[in-house]
Image (cartoon, grey):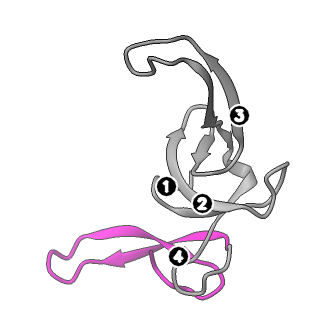
Amino acid sequence: MKIHKNDNVMVIAGNARGKSGKVLKMFREERRIIIEGVNIIKRHARPSQKNPQGGIVQKEAPISAANAMVICPKCSKPSRVGRKAVTDSATGKKHMMRVCRNCEEMF
């Protein structure tokens, strides 16, 4: 997946279209992500040690990673993500970096 944890993303499809937030958790096998403040659901919770009162709890539910787009830190626009091979000058090793397709900024 081209989206990583702690990336700022914008939802491009579905009920939460246009909302943006930080990726809190990823489920790679299911290709789903949880975004902060997006796709809020309500669940009934029993009283427990963690939640002694119980009641209705609001939390984020996962959405498909295909419905989110990474926001470039430089141009601040949602953009597709490419990959570019970069050689480390100190060690001489090559590794891949993510690149914004709009402004070619590496992140």
Q: Nearer the viewer, mark 2 or mark 1?
A: 2
Q: Residue at x 45, y 57 (%)?
A: 6
Residue 56 colored magenta?
no
Graded by Cα atoms within 10 Å as few (under 14), some (14 to 19) or many (20 or more), the crowding at tag 3 reads few
What distance separates the C-alpha of mark 4 from that of mark 2? 20 Å
Residue highlighted by disc 2? 21
Q: Which residue is mark 3?
A: 41
The answer to whether 79 appears left or right of 15 in the picture is left
Q: Which image quadrant is residue 28 in?
A: top right
On the rendered structure, is 7 left or right of 9?
Answer: left
Q: Residues within 10 Å of mark 4 (few under 14, many from 20)?
A: some
Sequence order check, earlier mark of 2 and 3:
2
Find residue 90 and report its horizontal and vertical position in percent: 14, 80
Q: Who's the residue at 50% across and 62% down the image?
A: 7
CB contact under 8 Å: marks 4 and 2: no
Lower position in the chain sequence, tag 4 or tag 3: 3
**Regarding mark 2 in the picture, which secondary structure is present there?**
strand
Q: Secondary structure at mark 3?
A: strand
What kind of residue is marked 1? His
